[in-house]
Amino acid sequence: MSITADLIRGHTDAIILAALMQGDSYGYRINRSMCDLTDGRFELKEATLYTAFRRLEESGYIRSYWGDEATGARRRYYAITPDGRSAYRGMVREWREASELLEKLMRFGSDGDVSGAEQI
Amino acid sequence: MSITADLIRGHTDAIILAALMQGDSYGYRINRSMCDLTDGRFELKEATLYTAFRRLEESGYIRSYWGDEATGARRRYYAITPDGRSAYRGMVREWREASELLEKLMRFGSDGDVSGAEQI
DNA sequence: GGGAAATACCTTGACAGGCGAGGTATAATG
DNA sequence: CATTATACCTCGCCTGTCAAGGTATTTCCC
């Protein structure tokens, strides 16, 4: 994966909720669709993913149930709750705000050549 | 501060480098200008700030020297190094890439109302 | 003169999230 | 029948953040 971990940190919950907004799904598939959507540039590590599921379930943002497929490995499905939906919307809002601020703070450096400027 | 810490996490280094791209400065002032630039919505905690300075200096991205003001509390000034400049540019590039991916991953959820959906 | 606030720096220890490394079990594929 | 893919899970380390505490100087008001 090309983007570093800390750039993602704190966003895993929102990402997972976003995926579940599309409908119920399970860990392995969510991870694959992340990969696909980003052309392999981004992938949640399994440990991270399952940690997040626990966290989200404890928060009441998702609930889980075992699938009943007759074949293949068993799957634990997750569904987003009403609380989860509103949390998701809040997270997206916060993310966009933070994103704008960061853009501003970072650009702060790049235009300004103008340099010699300042000192002491 | 209104935006939560984890949304910023991992970006402090880039933010500090951005500030130093404008010219030498010192901790207290950098923090203030962050505050001002974002209308108080964002502020680096002091502990975080000074931890980051140590980290950046160890990485060779900044160097420090004591100011020689005749009055007031002593100030430790920081200057960005050539390595720091190129690191800064890399960080901004990475941030923008990650930012686009995140936007894509998060929006992934929001269009789809269509809700009843459900899958299995 | 005395106290509070602002400026300016710093450290310690706890906490939380990410994840490497390891594990389990089933089914399909060669 | 061994390997790969699917699918789940846990333990323990690492790293960045930050609350809480500290120091020293200057200014401002009473």
Image: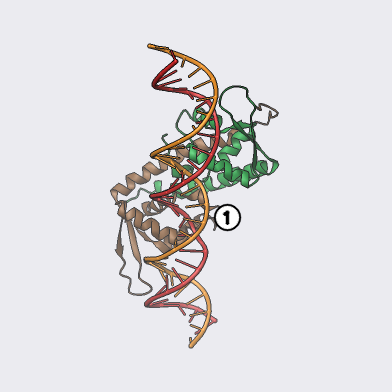
Chain colours: A brown, B green, C red, D orange
Q: Does residue A52 show up?
A: yes
**Image quarter of residue D8:** bottom left
Residue A79: x and y in percent read: 32, 56
Quickly name the residue at label 1: A2
Q: Is residue B73 above or below residue A10?
A: above
Q: Is residue A113 above or below residue D10?
A: above
Q: Is residue D17 left or right of residue A60?
A: right
In this view, the residue in front, B119 or A58, is A58
Residue sitting at x 38%, y 49%: B112
Residue sitting at x 68%, y 44%: B83
Q: Is residue B37 above or below residue A61?
A: above
Residue sitting at x 40%, y 62%: A27
In this view, the residue in front, D5 or A109, is A109
Amino acid type of the residue tagged 1 in the rendering: Ser
Kindly state the secondary structure of the residue where label 1 is placed.
loop
Q: Is residue A57 left or right of residue B87?
A: left
Viewport quadrant of the C terminus of chain B: bottom left
Q: Does residue B117 show up?
A: no
Residue B117: x and y in percent read: 33, 55
In this view, the residue in front, B72 or A112, is B72
Residue A68: x and y in percent read: 30, 69
Residue B78: x and y in percent read: 63, 35
**Image quarter of residue C23:** bottom left
Q: Is residue B25 above or below residue A20?
A: above
Subunit ID for the residue under disc 1: A
Viewport quadrant of the N terminus of chain B: top left
Judge the density around disc 1: few (<14), some (14-19), many (≥20) Cα neighbours within 10 Å. few
In this view, the residue in front, B77 or B38, is B77
